[in-house]
Amino acid sequence: MNTLVRAALAGAGCALAGGCAVGPNFQASAPPAVDRYTREPLPARTHAGVGASQQFALGAPVARWWTLFGSAKLDALEDEALAANPDLASARAALRQAREAWLAQRGARFPTVTLAADAQRAKNSVTIAPPLANNSEVYSLFTAGLNISYVFDVFGGVRRQVEAAAAQADNQRFVAEGVYLTLTTNVANAAIQLASLDAQMDDTSRIIAAARTTLDITRAQQKLGEAGTADVAVAETALEQAEQLAPPLQKQIDQQRDLLAALIGRPPSAAPADRFELADLQLPPTLPVSIPSALVRQRPDVQAADANVHVASAQVGVAVAARLPSFSLTGGPGGASSDLATLFANGNALWSITGGVTAPVFDAGALRHKQKAAEAALDQAKDQYRSAVLVALQNVADVLHAVLNDAQTLDHASAAEASAAKSLSLTRSQYQHGQVGVLAVLAAEGAWRQAEVTLSQARAARYADTVALYQALGGGWRDSSRFE
């Protein structure tokens, strides 16, 4: 007895005993067998220096995590994005579609009943036998009845199809939650980046003003014979070079505002005009760190990958069931009469019952190869899930390394800016007393310029990496029940 016959007999016996389905039964993937993300254990807190120290605490990120930054402007942007972003609206519509498809597929488990009725007025030829019992050549005929059909899900193929549709709906829910998470983090990052660029523009404006002052002083010294034409040319060049910094920065600011407008569902012409300040944001004092086994239940991309495994597992059962016999039952009660009033009277009732069985006999191996293809798809989905888990662990580890180093970077950047500012002040004083030339001033201004920009970037990096941690941990979307 070959394997397929044994499977058919086993499936039939199982169905008669209470119902079962061929193919593998899905079990949620096992969580990663690790207890931390980084090679070394995390310290209790980040480095305490110029910026506030942040404490690591076991737990998942809270819903609406962006409110922890304490910015009413950011909160308003997030709310507008959640209400008006077209990508999120599209994801919600796709989720509704997937759920309706699952509900439609679920109907295959039940009998289908249709009503059919018709009325006919006809004259029969005298050479043809009358169709009615009263031999009337001109007659009316009314018929009505129900058509009832049911396919016995002996081997669970229909149940596996329903299971696959349900898993596809789950996958779409996690995809929608991923869009939600990406949107909220993109809005926060856009606001932080815009605040950083505005701060850099402020630094650039001060640099331009300082270069203009240096040029004025150099020209005044030239009139007094204390500076030459070459010194004035160098100062003019320095001013032009400083002014060249402003247009590229303004371009980035304009583009960032356009991006922010798109994220919140507005055209660029209606981009938010409010100025964002890094000082308006506060660093969340506590940073959540979920254990890896909890992370895989929080990350929507990992959950989506697990749902894909479920879909592929159910499809294997569908493919196996397709190779086995199918049993069906059709029938229907009804009536036929030449008088509508006696349509269902005694003697006019009619009914039929038909049982059927179909089984594949020869298909050149098509169904067998479809089953093998489904099994290969299941193996692929499992490997993709493992890849998603590794990427999730890597994301969290990378962000934790960044958060730990951000505070120290900010310390060094702040110290470098203070030293550069002091050096510039001393050099300008020396220049005004004729102790150094204009080149020394310009060199000091260049060092201070870079230090100011680096400091602004270091401040923004702490906020951006904090946002990245909430994103890497799943963003607290499950608490919102927004897609349940």
Image: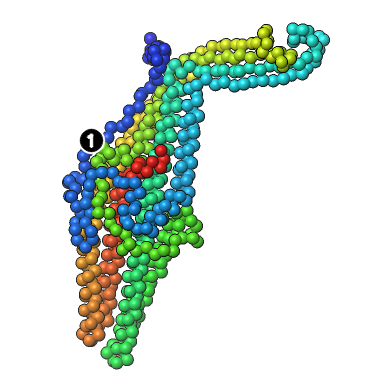
Is residue 429 something that shows in the picture? yes
Name the residue nearer the viewer: 41 or 334. Answer: 334
Residue 221: percent from left, percent from top? 29, 88
- Using the image, determine if residue 32 lies above or below residue 239: above
Q: Residue at x 29, y 49 (%)?
A: 469
Q: Residue at x 76, y 16 (%)?
A: 140
Name the residue nearer the viewer: 123 or 236. Answer: 123
Colour approach in the figure:
rainbow
Task: Locate residue 232: give its quadrant.
Answer: bottom left
Residue 420: percent from left, percent from top? 23, 72
Task: Locate residue 274: give its quadrant.
Answer: bottom left
> In the visual, does 22 lie left or right of 466?
right
- Using the image, determine if residue 228 lies above or below residue 414: below
**Amino acid type of the residue that numbered disc 1 sits on in the rendered structure:** Ala
Task: Locate residue 465: give its quadrant.
Answer: bottom left
Q: Residue at x 26, y 78 (%)?
A: 441
Circle 1 sits on which residue? Answer: 33
User: Which part of the image, by quadrant, shows the N terminus?
Assistant: top left
Residue 172: percent from left, percent from top? 42, 38
Kindly state the secondary structure of the residue where label 1 is placed: loop
